[in-house]
Amino acid sequence: MYTILASAIPEESRVVMESAFKNMAKVKFCSADNTLFNELKEREYDLLFLYASKESEGMGLLEKIDKSLSNMQVILISKVERPEFVVEVLQNGACDYLVYPPSVPRLEMAMQRAMEHRALRNEIDYLRHKQDIIYHFSDVISFSSNMQNVLKSLEKFSKTDSTILITGATGTGKSFLSGTVHYNSPRKQKPFIKINCANIPENLLESELFGHEKGAFTGADKQRIGRFEQAGGGTLFLDEIGEISLGLQSKLLRVLEEKSFERVGGNKTIYSDVRVIAATNKNLSEQIQNGKFREDLFYRINVLPVRLPDLKDRPECIEPLAQYFLRKYSKLLGSNVGGFTDHALKQIRGYSWPGNIRQLANTIERSVILEDGDKIGILNLSLPRVHQRSVIKGSISSEKNDIKDSGPASLVGQEKELILSALDECLWVQKNAAVLLGISPRSLNYKVKKFGITHPHWRKHK
Protein backbone atom coordinates (compact mmCIF):
# COMPACT_ATOMS: atom_id res chain seq x y z
CA MET A 1 0.00 0.00 0.00
CA TYR A 2 1.30 3.45 -0.95
CA THR A 3 1.69 6.30 1.52
CA ILE A 4 0.32 9.75 0.66
CA LEU A 5 0.84 13.07 2.40
CA ALA A 6 -1.83 15.68 1.62
CA SER A 7 -1.03 19.26 2.60
CA ALA A 8 -3.62 22.00 3.28
CA ILE A 9 -6.42 20.10 1.53
CA PRO A 10 -9.79 21.82 2.22
CA GLU A 11 -12.07 19.84 4.53
CA GLU A 12 -14.72 19.17 1.86
CA SER A 13 -12.14 17.47 -0.38
CA ARG A 14 -10.60 15.22 2.27
CA VAL A 15 -13.54 12.81 2.10
CA VAL A 16 -13.21 12.66 -1.69
CA MET A 17 -9.49 11.93 -1.43
CA GLU A 18 -9.97 9.21 1.19
CA SER A 19 -12.63 7.61 -1.00
CA ALA A 20 -10.35 7.69 -4.06
CA PHE A 21 -7.42 6.03 -2.29
CA LYS A 22 -9.11 3.79 0.28
CA ASN A 23 -7.97 0.55 -1.41
CA MET A 24 -4.64 1.81 -2.72
CA ALA A 25 -2.95 4.01 -0.14
CA LYS A 26 -2.87 5.40 3.36
CA VAL A 27 -3.48 9.15 3.39
CA LYS A 28 -2.22 11.54 6.04
CA PHE A 29 -3.43 15.14 6.09
CA CYS A 30 -1.38 18.04 7.41
CA SER A 31 -1.23 21.83 7.29
CA ALA A 32 0.99 23.79 4.92
CA ASP A 33 3.12 25.34 7.63
CA ASN A 34 6.08 23.73 9.41
CA THR A 35 4.04 20.56 9.93
CA LEU A 36 4.49 19.69 6.25
CA PHE A 37 8.27 19.95 6.34
CA ASN A 38 8.52 18.09 9.65
CA GLU A 39 6.53 15.23 8.12
CA LEU A 40 8.82 15.13 5.08
CA LYS A 41 11.88 14.89 7.31
CA GLU A 42 10.50 12.23 9.62
CA ARG A 43 8.88 9.84 7.15
CA GLU A 44 9.20 8.62 3.57
CA TYR A 45 6.10 9.20 1.44
CA ASP A 46 5.36 7.92 -2.05
CA LEU A 47 3.21 10.85 -3.11
CA LEU A 48 2.60 14.43 -1.95
CA PHE A 49 -0.53 16.44 -2.77
CA LEU A 50 -0.09 20.19 -2.28
CA TYR A 51 -3.07 22.53 -2.24
CA ALA A 52 -2.43 26.21 -3.00
CA SER A 53 -5.10 28.87 -3.37
CA LYS A 54 -2.73 31.36 -5.03
CA GLU A 55 -0.11 31.05 -7.75
CA SER A 56 2.66 32.50 -5.60
CA GLU A 57 1.81 30.15 -2.76
CA GLY A 58 2.02 27.08 -4.99
CA MET A 59 5.35 28.04 -6.55
CA GLY A 60 6.74 28.93 -3.14
CA LEU A 61 5.91 25.49 -1.75
CA LEU A 62 7.46 23.71 -4.73
CA GLU A 63 10.67 25.71 -4.34
CA LYS A 64 10.90 25.00 -0.59
CA ILE A 65 10.43 21.25 -0.83
CA ASP A 66 13.75 19.45 -0.71
CA LYS A 67 13.16 16.45 -2.94
CA SER A 68 16.42 14.89 -1.84
CA LEU A 69 14.64 13.98 1.40
CA SER A 70 12.51 11.37 -0.36
CA ASN A 71 11.70 9.58 -3.57
CA MET A 72 8.16 10.94 -3.65
CA GLN A 73 6.18 12.45 -6.51
CA VAL A 74 4.52 15.87 -6.08
CA ILE A 75 1.09 16.86 -7.41
CA LEU A 76 -0.15 20.44 -7.06
CA ILE A 77 -3.86 21.22 -6.65
CA SER A 78 -5.14 24.76 -7.21
CA LYS A 79 -8.10 26.74 -8.53
CA VAL A 80 -5.85 28.52 -11.02
CA GLU A 81 -6.54 27.40 -14.60
CA ARG A 82 -4.07 29.61 -16.43
CA PRO A 83 -2.08 27.38 -18.87
CA GLU A 84 1.18 29.29 -18.31
CA PHE A 85 0.95 28.59 -14.58
CA VAL A 86 0.41 24.86 -15.19
CA VAL A 87 3.50 24.74 -17.41
CA GLU A 88 5.56 26.57 -14.77
CA VAL A 89 4.39 24.14 -12.08
CA LEU A 90 5.48 21.13 -14.13
CA GLN A 91 8.81 22.76 -14.97
CA ASN A 92 9.50 23.27 -11.26
CA GLY A 93 9.26 19.61 -10.35
CA ALA A 94 5.60 18.67 -9.98
CA CYS A 95 4.65 15.51 -11.87
CA ASP A 96 1.00 16.58 -12.33
CA TYR A 97 -1.45 19.44 -11.80
CA LEU A 98 -5.12 19.13 -10.76
CA VAL A 99 -7.74 21.87 -10.92
CA TYR A 100 -9.68 22.21 -7.65
CA PRO A 101 -11.93 20.49 -6.75
CA PRO A 102 -10.58 17.17 -8.11
CA SER A 103 -12.94 14.27 -8.71
CA VAL A 104 -12.41 10.68 -7.56
CA PRO A 105 -11.54 9.41 -11.08
CA ARG A 106 -9.11 12.30 -11.62
CA LEU A 107 -7.39 11.60 -8.29
CA GLU A 108 -7.13 7.90 -9.06
CA MET A 109 -5.66 8.59 -12.50
CA ALA A 110 -3.19 11.14 -11.10
CA MET A 111 -1.93 8.68 -8.51
CA GLN A 112 -1.60 5.87 -11.04
CA ARG A 113 0.38 8.09 -13.43
CA ALA A 114 2.61 9.36 -10.62
CA MET A 115 3.48 5.84 -9.46
CA GLU A 116 4.15 4.72 -13.04
CA HIS A 117 6.41 7.73 -13.52
CA ARG A 118 8.34 6.90 -10.35
CA ALA A 119 8.69 3.23 -11.33
CA LEU A 120 9.97 4.25 -14.77
CA ARG A 121 12.45 6.71 -13.25
CA ASN A 122 13.72 4.05 -10.83
CA GLU A 123 14.12 1.57 -13.68
CA ILE A 124 16.07 4.12 -15.73
CA ASP A 125 18.33 4.84 -12.74
CA TYR A 126 18.87 1.10 -12.24
CA LEU A 127 19.70 0.48 -15.89
CA ARG A 128 22.00 3.49 -15.98
CA HIS A 129 23.99 2.28 -13.00
CA LYS A 130 24.33 -1.16 -14.57
CA GLN A 131 26.03 0.43 -17.57
CA ASP A 132 29.76 0.93 -17.65
CA ILE A 133 29.33 4.70 -17.54
CA ILE A 134 30.26 7.37 -15.02
CA TYR A 135 27.77 10.23 -15.06
CA HIS A 136 29.86 13.00 -13.47
CA PHE A 137 33.42 13.99 -14.37
CA SER A 138 34.17 14.49 -10.67
CA ASP A 139 33.55 10.76 -10.09
CA VAL A 140 36.19 9.62 -12.60
CA ILE A 141 39.29 8.29 -10.82
CA SER A 142 42.06 10.63 -11.95
CA PHE A 143 44.99 11.19 -9.60
CA SER A 144 47.58 11.62 -12.36
CA SER A 145 48.08 15.00 -14.02
CA ASN A 146 47.80 13.62 -17.57
CA MET A 147 44.38 12.08 -16.85
CA GLN A 148 43.19 15.24 -15.10
CA ASN A 149 44.10 17.23 -18.21
CA VAL A 150 42.12 14.79 -20.36
CA LEU A 151 39.05 15.19 -18.15
CA LYS A 152 39.30 18.97 -18.25
CA SER A 153 39.29 18.83 -22.05
CA LEU A 154 36.38 16.40 -22.21
CA GLU A 155 34.33 18.43 -19.75
CA LYS A 156 34.89 21.53 -21.90
CA PHE A 157 34.10 19.61 -25.11
CA SER A 158 30.89 18.17 -23.64
CA LYS A 159 29.29 21.64 -23.67
CA THR A 160 29.63 21.84 -27.45
CA ASP A 161 28.00 19.98 -30.33
CA SER A 162 31.22 19.31 -32.23
CA THR A 163 32.44 15.83 -33.12
CA ILE A 164 34.93 14.30 -30.67
CA LEU A 165 37.58 11.73 -31.58
CA ILE A 166 38.85 9.71 -28.60
CA THR A 167 41.98 7.68 -29.24
CA GLY A 168 43.93 5.37 -26.98
CA ALA A 169 44.91 1.75 -26.47
CA THR A 170 42.34 -0.97 -25.88
CA GLY A 171 40.86 -0.85 -22.39
CA THR A 172 41.74 2.75 -21.52
CA GLY A 173 38.12 3.80 -21.01
CA LYS A 174 37.05 5.32 -24.33
CA SER A 175 33.55 3.87 -24.17
CA PHE A 176 32.57 4.85 -20.65
CA LEU A 177 34.02 8.37 -20.98
CA SER A 178 31.91 8.89 -24.10
CA GLY A 179 28.90 8.34 -21.86
CA THR A 180 30.22 10.87 -19.37
CA VAL A 181 30.48 13.42 -22.17
CA HIS A 182 26.89 12.77 -23.27
CA TYR A 183 25.38 13.01 -19.79
CA ASN A 184 27.13 16.33 -19.21
CA SER A 185 26.04 17.82 -22.53
CA PRO A 186 22.94 19.79 -23.54
CA ARG A 187 21.72 16.53 -25.16
CA LYS A 188 21.68 14.55 -21.89
CA GLN A 189 17.88 14.16 -21.93
CA LYS A 190 18.03 12.58 -25.37
CA PRO A 191 19.21 9.05 -26.34
CA PHE A 192 22.80 7.87 -25.99
CA ILE A 193 23.41 5.06 -28.48
CA LYS A 194 26.61 3.02 -28.75
CA ILE A 195 27.76 0.78 -31.57
CA ASN A 196 31.01 -1.16 -31.89
CA CYS A 197 31.91 -1.07 -35.57
CA ALA A 198 34.43 -3.91 -35.19
CA ASN A 199 31.89 -6.42 -33.82
CA ILE A 200 29.47 -6.26 -36.77
CA PRO A 201 30.15 -7.85 -40.18
CA GLU A 202 30.77 -5.30 -42.91
CA ASN A 203 27.68 -6.32 -44.91
CA LEU A 204 25.42 -5.69 -41.88
CA LEU A 205 27.06 -2.56 -40.48
CA GLU A 206 25.39 -0.24 -43.01
CA SER A 207 21.98 -1.55 -41.95
CA GLU A 208 22.91 -1.13 -38.27
CA LEU A 209 23.90 2.48 -38.79
CA PHE A 210 21.24 3.65 -41.24
CA GLY A 211 18.49 1.04 -41.03
CA HIS A 212 16.83 -0.74 -43.94
CA GLU A 213 13.49 -1.00 -45.72
CA LYS A 214 11.44 -4.16 -45.97
CA GLY A 215 12.74 -6.35 -48.79
CA ALA A 216 16.07 -4.49 -49.06
CA PHE A 217 17.94 -7.80 -48.92
CA THR A 218 17.37 -11.45 -48.08
CA GLY A 219 15.98 -11.70 -44.59
CA ALA A 220 14.82 -8.07 -44.41
CA ASP A 221 11.21 -9.01 -43.67
CA LYS A 222 10.36 -5.67 -42.06
CA GLN A 223 11.58 -2.09 -41.86
CA ARG A 224 14.41 -1.47 -39.39
CA ILE A 225 15.37 1.81 -37.74
CA GLY A 226 19.13 2.42 -37.69
CA ARG A 227 21.30 3.83 -34.92
CA PHE A 228 21.37 7.33 -36.42
CA GLU A 229 17.58 7.50 -36.19
CA GLN A 230 17.52 5.92 -32.73
CA ALA A 231 19.95 8.57 -31.50
CA GLY A 232 17.94 11.46 -32.92
CA GLY A 233 18.57 14.61 -30.87
CA GLY A 234 21.12 12.76 -28.75
CA THR A 235 24.59 11.28 -29.10
CA LEU A 236 25.89 8.37 -31.20
CA PHE A 237 29.14 6.72 -30.07
CA LEU A 238 31.00 4.99 -32.91
CA ASP A 239 33.55 2.71 -31.27
CA GLU A 240 36.43 1.35 -33.37
CA ILE A 241 35.65 3.70 -36.26
CA GLY A 242 38.96 2.70 -37.86
CA GLU A 243 37.42 -0.68 -38.76
CA ILE A 244 34.79 0.79 -41.11
CA SER A 245 35.24 -0.01 -44.81
CA LEU A 246 36.07 2.75 -47.29
CA GLY A 247 32.68 2.46 -48.98
CA LEU A 248 30.81 2.96 -45.74
CA GLN A 249 33.17 5.78 -44.75
CA SER A 250 31.88 7.90 -47.64
CA LYS A 251 28.28 7.46 -46.47
CA LEU A 252 29.29 8.28 -42.92
CA LEU A 253 30.99 11.46 -44.16
CA ARG A 254 27.75 12.56 -45.81
CA VAL A 255 25.77 12.06 -42.59
CA LEU A 256 28.28 14.12 -40.62
CA GLU A 257 28.24 16.94 -43.16
CA GLU A 258 24.58 17.02 -44.21
CA LYS A 259 22.81 15.33 -41.27
CA SER A 260 20.94 13.20 -43.81
CA PHE A 261 20.94 9.65 -45.18
CA GLU A 262 18.73 6.96 -46.74
CA ARG A 263 17.94 3.57 -45.29
CA VAL A 264 19.34 0.55 -47.13
CA GLY A 265 16.93 -0.21 -49.98
CA GLY A 266 15.11 3.10 -49.59
CA ASN A 267 15.05 6.41 -51.45
CA LYS A 268 13.48 8.62 -48.79
CA THR A 269 15.95 11.12 -47.32
CA ILE A 270 15.97 11.07 -43.52
CA TYR A 271 17.31 13.92 -41.43
CA SER A 272 18.76 13.23 -37.98
CA ASP A 273 20.31 15.74 -35.61
CA VAL A 274 22.98 13.62 -33.89
CA ARG A 275 26.19 14.51 -32.08
CA VAL A 276 28.89 11.94 -32.92
CA ILE A 277 31.67 10.76 -30.64
CA ALA A 278 34.13 8.42 -32.38
CA ALA A 279 36.84 6.25 -30.87
CA THR A 280 39.65 4.06 -32.13
CA ASN A 281 42.79 2.32 -30.92
CA LYS A 282 44.36 2.60 -34.37
CA ASN A 283 46.67 5.28 -35.71
CA LEU A 284 44.37 6.90 -38.26
CA SER A 285 47.21 8.91 -39.81
CA GLU A 286 48.93 5.63 -40.72
CA GLN A 287 45.60 4.23 -41.91
CA ILE A 288 45.29 7.22 -44.26
CA GLN A 289 48.80 6.67 -45.65
CA ASN A 290 47.99 3.00 -46.22
CA GLY A 291 44.79 3.90 -48.05
CA LYS A 292 42.51 2.36 -45.40
CA PHE A 293 40.90 5.53 -44.06
CA ARG A 294 39.55 8.58 -45.86
CA GLU A 295 41.48 11.75 -45.15
CA ASP A 296 38.38 13.95 -45.46
CA LEU A 297 36.50 11.80 -42.92
CA PHE A 298 39.45 12.00 -40.54
CA TYR A 299 39.39 15.80 -40.63
CA ARG A 300 35.62 15.73 -40.12
CA ILE A 301 35.76 13.58 -36.96
CA ASN A 302 39.00 15.02 -35.60
CA VAL A 303 37.45 18.36 -34.64
CA LEU A 304 38.02 17.83 -30.92
CA PRO A 305 40.73 15.16 -30.47
CA VAL A 306 41.49 13.54 -27.10
CA ARG A 307 44.00 10.77 -26.39
CA LEU A 308 43.59 8.64 -23.28
CA PRO A 309 46.82 7.60 -21.55
CA ASP A 310 47.71 3.97 -20.89
CA LEU A 311 47.20 2.82 -17.32
CA LYS A 312 50.97 2.36 -16.86
CA ASP A 313 51.36 6.09 -17.66
CA ARG A 314 49.00 7.07 -14.83
CA PRO A 315 50.47 4.99 -11.95
CA GLU A 316 48.79 7.15 -9.29
CA CYS A 317 45.43 5.80 -10.48
CA ILE A 318 46.24 2.07 -10.37
CA GLU A 319 45.64 1.39 -6.67
CA PRO A 320 42.49 3.59 -6.40
CA LEU A 321 41.07 1.83 -9.47
CA ALA A 322 41.87 -1.58 -7.97
CA GLN A 323 40.10 -0.60 -4.74
CA TYR A 324 37.10 0.65 -6.75
CA PHE A 325 36.79 -2.62 -8.69
CA LEU A 326 37.21 -4.61 -5.47
CA ARG A 327 34.23 -2.81 -3.90
CA LYS A 328 32.21 -3.16 -7.09
CA TYR A 329 32.72 -6.90 -7.60
CA SER A 330 32.54 -7.79 -3.91
CA LYS A 331 29.09 -6.19 -3.86
CA LEU A 332 27.96 -7.75 -7.14
CA LEU A 333 29.19 -11.23 -6.21
CA GLY A 334 28.10 -11.08 -2.56
CA SER A 335 31.67 -11.64 -1.39
CA ASN A 336 33.21 -10.73 1.98
CA VAL A 337 36.55 -9.83 0.40
CA GLY A 338 37.33 -6.35 1.63
CA GLY A 339 40.95 -5.62 0.76
CA PHE A 340 44.34 -6.72 -0.54
CA THR A 341 47.36 -8.08 1.26
CA ASP A 342 50.37 -5.76 1.28
CA HIS A 343 52.21 -7.99 -1.17
CA ALA A 344 49.20 -8.15 -3.50
CA LEU A 345 49.03 -4.35 -3.55
CA LYS A 346 52.75 -4.21 -4.27
CA GLN A 347 52.25 -6.55 -7.20
CA ILE A 348 49.31 -4.50 -8.51
CA ARG A 349 51.38 -1.32 -8.36
CA GLY A 350 54.38 -2.98 -10.02
CA TYR A 351 52.53 -4.52 -12.94
CA SER A 352 52.46 -2.61 -16.24
CA TRP A 353 48.86 -3.61 -17.15
CA PRO A 354 49.17 -4.00 -20.93
CA GLY A 355 45.39 -4.51 -21.13
CA ASN A 356 44.85 -1.28 -19.19
CA ILE A 357 41.70 -0.69 -17.09
CA ARG A 358 39.81 -3.56 -18.71
CA GLN A 359 42.53 -6.03 -17.69
CA LEU A 360 42.65 -4.61 -14.16
CA ALA A 361 38.86 -4.95 -13.80
CA ASN A 362 38.87 -8.54 -15.09
CA THR A 363 41.78 -9.46 -12.81
CA ILE A 364 40.06 -8.10 -9.71
CA GLU A 365 36.78 -9.80 -10.62
CA ARG A 366 38.54 -13.16 -11.00
CA SER A 367 40.43 -12.65 -7.74
CA VAL A 368 37.23 -11.90 -5.81
CA ILE A 369 35.71 -15.13 -7.14
CA LEU A 370 38.75 -17.24 -6.24
CA GLU A 371 39.54 -15.69 -2.85
CA ASP A 372 38.21 -17.55 0.22
CA GLY A 373 39.62 -15.16 2.80
CA ASP A 374 38.85 -11.52 3.54
CA LYS A 375 41.84 -10.17 1.59
CA ILE A 376 43.10 -10.91 -1.91
CA GLY A 377 46.60 -12.39 -1.87
CA ILE A 378 49.09 -12.64 -4.72
CA LEU A 379 48.20 -16.29 -5.31
CA ASN A 380 44.63 -15.49 -6.35
CA LEU A 381 45.73 -12.33 -8.12
CA SER A 382 47.49 -14.65 -10.60
CA LEU A 383 49.43 -12.01 -12.52
CA PRO A 384 51.99 -13.41 -15.00
CA ARG A 385 55.68 -12.60 -14.73
CA VAL A 386 55.60 -10.90 -18.11
CA HIS A 387 55.03 -7.15 -17.71
CA GLN A 388 55.90 -7.24 -13.98
CA ARG A 389 58.25 -4.51 -12.83
CA SER A 390 58.46 -5.60 -9.18
CA VAL A 391 56.53 -7.98 -7.00
CA ILE A 392 57.80 -9.58 -3.78
CA LYS A 393 60.78 -7.58 -2.55
CA GLY A 394 62.33 -7.83 -5.98
CA SER A 395 62.20 -11.63 -6.07
CA ILE A 396 60.48 -11.51 -9.44
CA SER A 397 62.52 -9.65 -12.00
CA SER A 398 61.49 -6.83 -14.30
CA GLU A 399 60.18 -7.44 -17.79
CA LYS A 400 63.66 -7.05 -19.27
CA ASN A 401 65.19 -9.73 -17.00
CA ASP A 402 62.16 -11.97 -16.99
CA ILE A 403 62.82 -15.67 -16.53
CA LYS A 404 61.38 -17.59 -19.41
CA ASP A 405 58.66 -20.08 -18.54
CA SER A 406 59.29 -23.70 -19.35
CA GLY A 407 55.61 -24.42 -19.85
CA PRO A 408 52.57 -22.67 -21.28
CA ALA A 409 51.46 -19.35 -19.74
CA SER A 410 48.43 -20.81 -17.94
CA LEU A 411 46.85 -19.95 -14.61
CA VAL A 412 48.19 -23.23 -13.19
CA GLY A 413 51.71 -22.36 -14.31
CA GLN A 414 51.44 -18.86 -12.89
CA GLU A 415 50.17 -20.23 -9.58
CA LYS A 416 53.12 -22.60 -9.28
CA GLU A 417 55.56 -19.80 -10.11
CA LEU A 418 54.09 -17.56 -7.41
CA ILE A 419 54.39 -20.33 -4.83
CA LEU A 420 58.00 -21.02 -5.79
CA SER A 421 58.83 -17.31 -5.63
CA ALA A 422 57.21 -16.95 -2.20
CA LEU A 423 59.00 -20.03 -0.82
CA ASP A 424 62.31 -18.80 -2.14
CA GLU A 425 61.71 -15.37 -0.59
CA CYS A 426 60.92 -16.98 2.80
CA LEU A 427 63.91 -19.35 2.73
CA TRP A 428 61.53 -22.26 2.09
CA VAL A 429 59.69 -21.88 5.40
CA GLN A 430 56.13 -22.79 4.41
CA LYS A 431 54.46 -20.94 7.29
CA ASN A 432 56.08 -17.64 6.32
CA ALA A 433 55.41 -18.23 2.63
CA ALA A 434 51.72 -18.81 3.39
CA VAL A 435 51.55 -15.42 5.14
CA LEU A 436 53.26 -13.81 2.16
CA LEU A 437 50.78 -15.38 -0.24
CA GLY A 438 47.79 -14.50 1.92
CA ILE A 439 46.59 -18.11 2.35
CA SER A 440 46.54 -20.58 5.21
CA PRO A 441 49.53 -22.92 5.82
CA ARG A 442 47.19 -25.86 5.20
CA SER A 443 46.23 -24.50 1.77
CA LEU A 444 49.87 -23.94 0.87
CA ASN A 445 50.80 -27.47 2.00
CA TYR A 446 48.05 -28.85 -0.25
CA LYS A 447 49.31 -26.88 -3.24
CA VAL A 448 52.96 -27.87 -2.56
CA LYS A 449 51.94 -31.52 -2.77
CA LYS A 450 49.70 -30.84 -5.78
CA PHE A 451 52.57 -29.33 -7.80
CA GLY A 452 55.16 -31.79 -6.50
CA ILE A 453 57.34 -29.02 -5.05
CA THR A 454 60.27 -30.27 -2.92
CA HIS A 455 63.38 -28.80 -1.31
CA PRO A 456 66.46 -30.39 0.39
CA HIS A 457 65.86 -28.25 3.46
CA TRP A 458 62.58 -30.05 4.15
CA ARG A 459 64.21 -33.52 4.05
CA LYS A 460 66.63 -32.58 6.82
CA HIS A 461 63.75 -32.02 9.22
CA LYS A 462 61.75 -35.19 8.47
Image (spheres, rainbow, N blue to C red):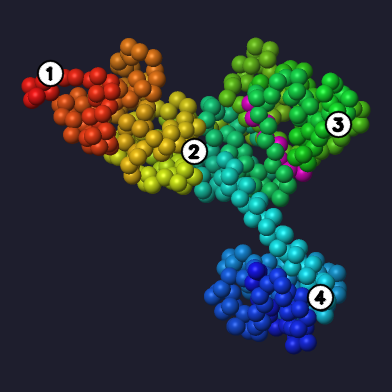
- The residue carrying mark 3 is 222
The Cα–Cα distance between marks 1 and 4, rounded to whole angstroms, is 89 Å
Residue 147's disc number: 2
Dominant SS in magenta: strand
Magenta-highlighted residues? 233-240
Q: Quadrant of residue 214?
A: top right
Q: Earlier in the sequence, mark 4 or mark 3?
A: 4
In the drawing, what numbered circle is on residue 53?
none
Give the residue drawn at x 67%, y 77%: 27
With respect to residue 366, does 205 lie above or below? above
Question: In the rendered image, which quarter is residue 442 located in?
Answer: top left
Between marks 2 and 3, how big is the CA–CA gap? 46 Å
What secondary structure is marked by label 2?
helix
- Residues at discs 1 and 4 in contact (Cβ within 8 Å): no
What amino acid is found at the position of numbered circle 1 in the picture? Pro
Identify the residue position indicated by label 4 in the image. 104
C-beta proximity under 8 Å, tags 1 and 3: no
Q: Residue at x 47, y 27 (%)?
A: 355
